C-alpha cells in the first residue's frame, strides 16, 4: 500500500492542507511549528486511530483558533493487488465517521474499515508502526546511537501483536536495500537523495545569483514605475481629450438623427395631406371594387348583344312566309272503281260460262276484271304516296315551328341582355360602355396613385408608426433638430 495524496482539514495548525505525494521519498521541509509533525500525526490517525475515540488527546487535535469543527483526514492510496482506493475519517467522538472506497467496494462501518486497513498495510498495530516506519524527530538520535534500542522497540511491538511480523520484516529489509543501493545504474533512494541535495545546492547558488539579479531588476523596476506614472498621466490627459471628442461626435450624431427624423416626418406630413386631398377627389362616386365588376359585366353584356344580333341576322324569319302543304293524292275512288270492275269482270266471266256464251263472254269478263285490278293497283300506289306526303307535311310544320321558337328565344335573350345593360349603365349614371371604360381607367389610375402614395408614406415612417398626429410629431422633430 502506497499513499499518493493526503488531505487534512481542521487539524491543529492546518485548516486545509492538500499534499500530493511523489512515488519515491517525499521530503517535507519547513521552519519549526510549521506543522510537519502534524502531517506525520495525521497519517498515524488515519491508519490506526478509531473515529469514535474521545479524550483530551482527541480534543487537542482540533484546529487552533478554529470554530471547533471535527478534524477530517482523507487518504488516497494505491495497492498492487486491490488497486487504488480512498480513506476518509472524521474524528467527532461518538458521531465519528469512516469511509473506505476501493474499486467497486465501499465500507462505512468504522470497525470493518480498521480491519481492512490492517490487511492492506500489513501493520498489526500502531505500536509496530511507531517502532518501524513512523519514527519521530526526537527519537532519531537515540536510534542512531543505540541499535539495541531499535531492537527493543521492535521486540516490544512484536510481543504485543505478532500478526504479519515476518512479512513486515521482509518488506522492511527490501525497503532498506532499496534505500542503501550504491550502484550507478540502479542507485538507492539515499544516493538519489544525495544527488538531489547536490542539485538543490546548485539551485540554491543559482537562486542567490538570481537574488542579486533581482536587486538589479528592482532598481530597473523602480525607474520603469516612474516612467509608467508619467505615461499614465499622459494617458489620463489623452482620455480626457478623447472623452471631449466622443461628446462632440455624439452631439453630431444626435443632430444628424434629429435632422433625418425631421425630414422623414415632414415628407410623411406632405404625403398624408396629398393622400387626403386625392382621397376626396375620386373620378367616380363608386368604389373601384364595385365599379370594375360592373364594367366587366357591361363588357360581357355588350359582347353577348353582338353575338345575339349576329345569330338573328343569320336566322331567316319564316313567320312572314305562307308555305302551303303538299297536296295529298286521292286514291279511294280509284280503289272503289278497280274493286267494282274486278267484281263485275268476274261475274261477267262466270255468267258467260253459265249462259254458254263461249270464249267471247269469258274474255270480256277477264278484260273487265283486269282493268279493275289495274285500277286497284293504281289506288294502292296512290295510297302509299299519300302517306309519304302526309309525313313530309308533318315534318315541314315541325321544322317551321322549331325555327319560329328558336328565333323567339334569341329575340327574348337579346331583349333581356339589352335591358340588363341599360340598367347597369343607369346604376353607374352613364350613357354607354365607352364612358364606363373611360371612368374605370380614370378611377384605376387614381387608386393606383393613392396606393403608391400610401406605400411611400409607410416606407418613410418604416416600423416607427407614431400614435400622435404626424404634423405634431414633425414639429416636435424640428424643435429637437434646432436644439441639437
Image (tube, helix red, strand yellow):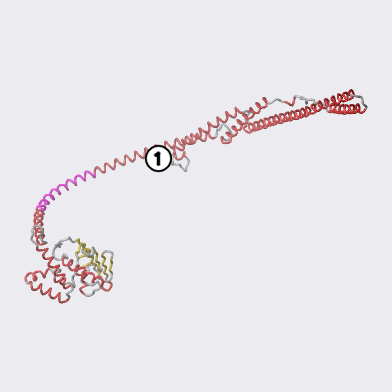
Which sits in the foreground, 55 or 142?
A: 142
Let me know if residue 64 appears in the view: no
Magenta span contains residue 311: no
Find out whether residue 215 is within the magenta segment.
Answer: yes
Residue 465 at what x, y percent from top left? 45, 41
Q: Residue furthest bottom?
A: 159
Residue 208 at x, y = what percent?
A: 9, 54
Residue at the limit of the structure toward the left, as seen here: 145
Q: Where's residue 362, x and y in %? A: 88, 25
Image quarter hosting the N terminus? bottom left
Q: Which residues are magenta?
A: 209-236
> For this rendering, which residue is in front, 467 or 194?
194
Quadrant of res 420: top right
Q: Label 1: how many residues lie within 10 Å, few (<14), some (14-19) or many (20+)?
A: some
Q: Position of residue 336 (x, y in %)?
A: 86, 28
Residue at 75 percent across and 24 percent down: it is: 321
Q: Looking at the image, which residue sits at the far top? A: 360
**Is 172 rendered above or below residue 455?**
below
Q: Nearer the viewer, residue 356 or 46?
A: 356
Q: Main secondary structure of the magenta part?
A: helix
Secondary structure beneath disc 1? helix
Number of dots carrying numbers: 1
| Residue at image location 25% in from the left, 65% down from the top | 102
Can residue 318 be spotted in the picture? yes
Quarter of the image where one finds residue 476: top left
Asked which quadrant contains residue 364, the reply is top right
- Position of residue 316 relative to residue 252, above or below, is above
On-image quarter of the C terminus: top left
Residue to which mark 1 is pinned: 480
Amino acid at each position: 500500500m502506497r499513499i499518493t495524496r493526503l488531505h487534512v482539514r481542521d487539524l491543529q495548525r492546518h485548516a486545509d492542507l492538500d499534499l500530493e505525494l511523489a512515488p519515491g521519498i517525499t521530503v517535507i521541509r519547513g521552519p519549526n511549528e510549521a506543522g510537519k509533525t502534524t502531517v506525520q500525526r495525521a497519517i498515524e490517525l488515519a491508519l490506526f486511530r478509531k473515529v469514535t475515540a474521545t479524550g483530551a488527546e482527541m480534543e487537542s487535535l482540533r484546529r487552533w483558533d478554529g470554530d471547533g469543527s471535527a478534524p477530517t483526514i482523507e487518504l488516497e492510496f494505491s495497492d498492487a493487488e486491490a488497486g487504488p482506493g480512498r480513506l476518509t475519517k472524521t474524528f467527532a467522538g461518538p458521531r465519528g465517521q469512516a469511509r473506505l472506497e476501493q474499486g467497486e467496494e465501499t465500507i462505512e462501518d468504522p470497525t470493518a474499515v480498521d480491519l481492512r486497513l490492517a490487511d492492506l498495510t500489513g501493520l498489526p498495530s500502531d505500536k509496530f508502526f511507531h517502532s518501524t516506519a513512523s519514527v519521530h524527530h526526537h527519537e532519531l538520535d537515540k536510534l542512531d546511537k543505540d541499535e539495541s534500542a531499535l531492537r527493543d522497540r521492535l521486540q516490544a511491538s512484536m510481543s504485543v501483536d505478532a500478526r504479519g511480523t515476518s512479512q513486515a520484516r521482509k518488506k522492511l529489509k527490501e525497503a532498506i536495500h532499496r534505500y542503501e543501493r550504491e550502484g550507478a545504474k540502479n542507485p538507492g533512494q539515499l544516493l538519489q537523495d544525495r544527488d538531489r541535495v547536490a542539485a538543490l545546492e546548485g539551485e540554491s547558488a543559482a537562486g542567490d545569483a538570481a537574488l542579486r539579479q533581482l536587486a538589479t531588476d528592482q532598481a530597473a523596476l523602480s525607474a520603469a514605475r516612474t516612467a509608467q506614472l508619467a505615461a499614465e498621466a499622459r494617458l489620463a490627459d489623452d482620455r480626457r481629450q478623447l472623452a471631449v471628442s466622443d461628446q462632440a461626435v455624439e452631439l453630431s450624431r444626435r443632430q444628424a438623427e434629429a435632422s433625418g427624423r425631421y425630414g422623414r416626418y415632414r415628407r410623411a406630413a406632405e404625403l398624408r395631406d396629398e393622400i387626403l386631398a386625392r382621397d376626396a377627389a375620386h373620378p367616380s362616386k363608386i368604389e373601384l371594387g364595385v365599379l370594375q365588376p360592373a364594367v366587366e359585366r357591361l363588357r360581357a353584356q355588350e359582347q353577348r348583344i353582338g353575338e345575339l344580333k349576329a345569330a338573328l341576322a343569320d336566322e331567316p324569319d319564316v313567320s312572314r312566309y305562307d308555305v302551303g302543304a303538299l297536296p295529298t293524292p286521292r286514291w279511294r275512288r280509284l280503289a272503289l272503281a278497280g274493286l267494282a270492275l274486278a267484281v263485275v269482270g268476274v261475274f261477267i266471266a262466270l255468267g258467260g260460262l253459265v249462259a254458254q256464251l263461249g270464249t267471247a263472254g269469258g274474255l270480256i269478263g277477264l278484260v273487265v276484271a283486269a282493268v279493275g285490278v289495274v285500277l286497284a293497283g293504281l289506288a294502292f300506289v296512290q295510297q302509299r304516296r299519300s302517306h309519304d306526303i302526309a309525313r313530309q307535311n308533318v315534318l315541314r310544320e315541325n321544322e317551321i315551328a322549331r325555327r319560329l321558337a328558336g328565333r323567339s328565344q334569341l329575340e327574348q335573350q337579346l331583349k333581356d341582355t339589352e335591358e340588363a345593360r341599360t340598367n347597369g349603365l343607369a346604376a353607374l349614371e352613364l350613357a354607354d360602355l365607352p364612358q364606363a371604360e373611360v371612368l374605370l381607367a380614370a378611377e384605376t389610375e387614381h387608386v393606383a396613385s393613392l396606393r403608391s402614395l400610401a406605400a411611400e408614406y409607410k416606407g418613410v415612417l418604416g416600423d416607427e408608426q407614431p400614435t400622435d398626429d404626424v404634423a405634431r410629431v414633425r414639429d416636435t422633430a424640428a424643435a429637437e433638430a434646432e436644439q441639437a
